[in-house]
Image (tube, rainbow, N blue to C red):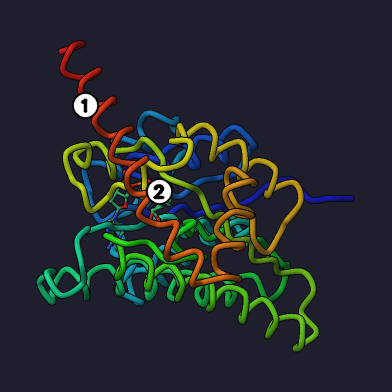
Amino acid sequence: MTPPPAGAVVTGAGRGLGRLLAALLVERGYRVLVTDIDEAAARATAQRLGPDVLWATVDVRDEEQVAAARDHVMTEAGRLDIWVNNAGVLATGPAWEQPPEARRLMLEVNALGTINGTVTAIEAMRDAGGHIVNIVSLAGLTAVPGEAVYAASKHAAIGFSLSTLADLRLAGIEDIDISCVCPDGIWTPMLHDKLDDPASALSFSGRLLQPTDVVTAVRKVLDRPRPVTSVPGWRGLQVRLADAFPGLGLRALPLMVARGRRVQHRMSARLRQGA
Ligand SMILES: NC(=O)c1ccc[n+]([C@@H]2O[C@H](COP(=O)([O-])OP(=O)(O)OC[C@H]3O[C@@H](n4cnc5c(N)ncnc54)[C@H](O)[C@@H]3O)[C@@H](O)[C@H]2O)c1
């Protein structure tokens, strides 16, 4: 008999996609620990989601804070079933124009934060198994002009996740899954201030997703773990084709950037009219 749901942790759950993923896990009956570097946001999300929802301030760059979150949920729920590494940051522009702190921040939050969360969750899941869901990005699968360091951090996250999944299986550990979800641009606060930013055009070049589209994908992954899920699936295929033929892919990128700029202008005009 499958045991009832126990503990779940979502990082960066104070707003955006993470907040909705925490809501999904609450709806599924998990005892959810909402974490974020932003204390007020973590607290407000937990309060919104219900009286039993836990919250903690956690900077995913700090291994000790991440371990404390694991211990917190284990104490309250008895077992850790799900860990979602969702926290992420994006600073745009060519790498050589970015301040070193911005480059370091993206690598530390997006890559090291995912590594910290995954390792910490594995330690807690060794006895009873569990599922780690890593929110990556299509930028983890292909070249993204204007978001080069972000893409590097997300490639690191996916390379680490898939390699660790293989290590688990080689070690004979079959009951811990790692699923990477790689969405196209999502209309969350991460992009809300990027409509006038040419460097983030590629985030707008596909079908701009609503956060609920990604929640639907995560819902499916929770039911059936998969190493990599692109959202939407056709964009995953498109970027993998571009990677298979990098020369062609690079030639197509200016067209994609132009398309993204058109979408940004259209959305910007629409928002101005609505204002
Ligand atoms: N919005 C997009 O277009 C898009 C596309 C693909 C993937 N993603 C990924 O989805 C995830 C969620 O992003 P979002 O769009 O909801 O962005 P968001 O900016 O709305 O939310 C990110 C959250 O992460 C938190 N955070 C930042 N640094 C942190 C740290 N050091 N420790 C803990 N929390 C921290 C923020 O406080 C915020 O609550 C990220 O990993 C992002 O890279 C976003």
Residue 261: x, y in percent?
Answer: 28, 40
Mark sitting earlier along the chain (2/1): 2
Q: Which residue is drawn at 50% across and 49% down?
A: 183
Task: Answer above or below: position of 258 versus 229.
Answer: above
Q: Name the residue under label 1.
A: 268
In this rendering, would 182 be left or right of 4?
Answer: left
Residue 92: x, y in percent?
Answer: 22, 58
Instruction: Say what amino acid the circle numbered 2 marks.
Output: Met
Q: Which residue is drawn at 13% across and 77% down?
A: 100
Which quadrant is the C terminus positioned in?
A: top left
Q: Name the residue under label 2.
A: 256
Residue 50: x, y in percent?
Answer: 45, 30
Which residue is the extreme one toward the right?
A: 1
Task: Answer above or below: position of 198 versus 132.
Answer: above
Task: Pick whichever, 251 or 151, lies toward us.
Answer: 251
Instruction: Say what amino acid the circle numbered 1 marks.
Output: Ser
Count residues near mark 2 (Cα–Cα under 10 Å), then give few for <14, some for 14-19, many for 20+. some
- Mark 2–mark 1 Cα distance, whole angstroms, equals 18 Å
Which is in the foreground here, disc 2 or disc 1?
2
Residue 107: x, y in percent?
Answer: 31, 73
